[in-house]
Image (cartoon, rainbow, N blue to C red):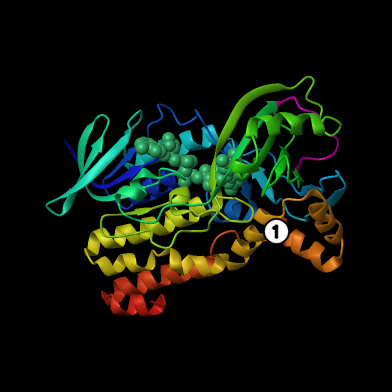
C-alpha cells in the first residue's frame, strides 16, 4: 500500500495543474485517472482566453493560432462582428497539453496511476485509506478533480453540482471558412437551448458544436441540424472529422462548501465554471494554483484554519452578475425574443456589454483576490498565526 501526502483523483487540467505545483513544493503526490492515456476522450473545445494565456505558462506549441474576431449570429442568422485589438483566444491542442503537463508532473516527482478508478475512501488514524481499482493507498489529504459529476465530492460530503448543460462537438481538419480565424457564436433556443452553438476556427482546426440544457434538446440531432444550417458559412465537403467530443458543464456557479480537513475540490468538481460563458479552463488553472498554496500550507502547519480561505463563498460573490445572466439565458426559450435581444444588442450600451462578455478579462475571481490570498499567505508564514489570516480573508 502506497503512502502519500496528497492523492488527486482526475488528471484533467485542474488535477494536472495542482499536482505539478504541489510536487514542486516537495509534497508527495499520487495522481490517479481512469483513462489509460490523457490524449483520449477529451471533452473540451479548449478555448483559452487572453487572461489565462498571460498569467500561466501554457506551452506555445500546445496552442493553435491566435483569434481576434468574434461573429455573433441571431436565430435568423443576422450577424454582428466584434474585433479586438488583442489576440483574445487560442484553441488548445488539449491532448498534447495534458501530456506535457503530465511530463512536468513526473519530472517534479508525482506518482502517476493511469487506468485506475477511484472507488471510495475511509478515515483511519488521522489519515485516509483510499480505495482504488488497482488496490488501496493511504493519504493525508484527498483532492477531487474528477469532473462535473464528482464522486469524491459526494464521499467527502462537500457540495455537489446541481445545474449543468451538455455540449457536443466535432473537430475537423480542412474546413473552409471565409475571413480570418474566428469564433462564431449562434444564439438559437432550439438548437442550443440556454447556451450557444459554435464554430471555433483558428485556421488549422475547426470545432463545430452545440450546447444546452439536456432536457430541452437532443444534442447529436441538434449538432447534425446545426451543421446543415451553417453549410453556407462553413464548407465541410473536403474536411476530415478527427474527433468527436462531449461532456457536462456545471453552470450553477462555484460551489460554497469545497474543502474540509479530509479533502477539497478543484475545477468542474468545485463548479468553477463561468455560469454565463461556460468557460472552465481559466478557473481550472487559477483555482488549482490557489489550492496548491492552501494545501501546502495546511500540510506543513497542520492547522485547519489554513483551509478557511478555500471557500466557494469567497469566490461566489464575483459570480453574481453571471449567475443572473444564466437565469435569463435559461428562460429565454422563444426564437422571436432571442431575435429581439440580438437586435437591441446593436445599441451602443448593450454592444459594449456584449464586447465585455467576449473580450472582458474577468472569468474567475481576478488576480486581486488571488494576490491578496498570496499576500495573506506570505504574511501568515511570517507571523505563523491563523487569526489574522481569517480576518484579512473576511471570515
Ligand atoms: C463540450 C465542451 C466544451 C468546452 N469548451 C470549453 C472551452 O472552449 N473553454 C473553456 O474555458 N472551457 C470549456 N469547457 C469547460 C472545460 O472544458 C472544463 O471546465 C474543464 O475541462 C474541466 O477540467 P477538470 O480538470 O475540472 O475536469 P475534467 O477535464 O473533466 O477531468 C476530470 C478527470 O477525472 C477523471 N475521473 C473522473 N472520475 C474518476 C474516477 N472515479 N476515478 C478516476 N478518474 C476519474 C476523468 O477521466 C477526467 O480525466 C467545455 C466543456 C465541454 C463539455
Q: Is residue 374 left or right of residue 356?
A: left
Instruction: Please name the residue that numbered disc 1 is placed on.
Output: 357
Location of residue 372 with respect to 257 vertically, above or below: below
**Residue 344: image x %, image y %?**
85, 61
Q: Nearer the viewer, residue 183 or 191?
A: 191
Can you say which quadrant of the picture contains the C terminus?
bottom left
Magenta segment, principal secondary structure? loop
Q: Is residue 220 magenta?
A: no
Q: Is residue 47 left or right of residue 74?
A: left
Q: Residue at x 40, y 49 (%)?
A: 18
Q: Is residue 121 left or right of residue 230?
A: left
Res. 264 in view: yes
Q: Which residues are drawn in magenta?
A: 173-183
Q: Residue at x 78, y 48 (%)?
A: 69
Label 1 crowd (10 A; few <14 / some 14-19 / many >=20)? some
Q: Nearer the viewer, residue 383 or 168?
A: 168
**Tag 1 secondary structure:** helix
**Residue 37: image x %, image y %?**
43, 27
**Residue 20: image x %, image y %?**
39, 46
Q: Nearer the viewer, residue 279 or 302?
A: 279
Location of residue 289 with respect to 60 vertically, above or below: below
Amino acid at each position: 500500500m502506497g503512502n502519500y501526502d496528497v492523492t488527486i483523483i482526475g488528471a484533467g487540467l485542474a488535477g494536472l495543474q495542482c499536482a505539478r505545483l504541489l510536487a514542486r513544493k516537495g509534497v508527495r503526490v499520487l495522481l490517479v485517472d481512469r483513462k489509460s492515456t490523457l490524449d483520449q476522450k477529451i471533452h473540451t473545445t479548449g478555448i483559452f482566453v487572453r487572461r489565462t494565456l498571460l498569467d500561466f505558462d501554457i506551452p506555445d506549441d500546445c496552442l493553435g493560432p491566435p483569434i481576434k474576431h468574434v461573429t455573433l449570429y441571431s436565430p435568423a442568422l443576422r450577424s454582428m462582428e466584434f474585433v479586438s485589438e488583442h489576440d483574445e483566444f487560442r484553441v488548445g491542442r488539449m491532448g498534447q497539453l495534458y501530456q506535457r503537463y503530465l511530463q512536468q508532473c513526473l519530472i517534479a516527482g508525482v506518482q502517476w496511476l493511469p487506468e485506475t478508478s477511484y472507488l471510495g475512501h475511509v478515515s483511519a488514524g488521522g489519515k485516509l485509506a483510499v480505495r482504488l481499482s488497482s488496490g488501496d493507498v493511504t493519504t493525508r489529504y484527498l483532492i477531487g478533480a474528477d469532473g462535473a459529476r464528482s464522486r469524491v465530492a459526494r464521499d467527502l460530503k462537500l457540495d455537489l453540482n446541481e445545474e449543468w448543460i451538455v455540449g457536443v462537438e466535432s473537430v475537423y481538419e480542412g474546413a473552409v471558412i471565409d475571413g480570418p480565424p474566428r469564433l462564431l457564436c449562434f444564439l438559437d433556443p432550439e438548437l442550443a437551448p440556454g447556451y450557444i452553438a459554435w464554430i471555433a476556427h483558428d485556421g488549422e482546426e475547426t470545432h463545430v458544436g452545440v450546447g444546452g440544457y439536456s432536457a430541452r434538446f437532443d444534442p447529436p440531432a441538434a449538432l447534425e441540424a446545426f451543421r446543415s444550417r451553417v453549410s453556407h458559412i462553413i464548407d465541410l465537403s473536403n474536411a476530415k472529422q478527427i474527433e468527436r467530443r462531449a461532456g457536462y458543464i456545471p453552470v450553477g456557479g462555484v460551489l460554497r462548501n469545497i474543502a474540509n480537513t479530509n479533502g477539497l475540490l478543484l475545477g468542474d468538481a468545485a463548479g468553477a465554471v463561468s455560469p454565463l460563458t461556460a468557460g472552465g479552463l481559466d478557473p481550472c488553472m487559477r483555482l488549482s494554483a490557489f489550492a496548491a498554496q492552501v494545501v501546502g500550507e495546511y500540510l506543513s502547519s497542520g492547522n485547519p484554519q489554513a483551509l478557511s480561505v478555500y471557500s466557494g463563498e469567497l469566490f461566489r460573490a464575483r459570480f453574481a452578475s453571471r449567475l443572473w445572466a444564466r437565469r435569463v439565458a435559461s428562460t429565454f426559450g422563444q426564437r422571436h425574443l432571442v431575435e429581439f435581444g440580438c437586435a437591441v444588442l446593436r445599441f451602443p450600451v448593450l454592444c459594449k456589454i456584449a464586447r465585455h462578455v467576449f473580450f472582458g478579462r474577468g472569468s474567475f475571481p481576478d488576480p486581486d483576490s488571488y494576490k491578496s490570498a498570496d499576500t495573506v499567505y506570505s504574511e501568515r508564514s511570517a507571523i505563523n498565526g491563523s487569526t489574522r489570516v481569517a480576518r484579512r480573508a473576511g471570515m
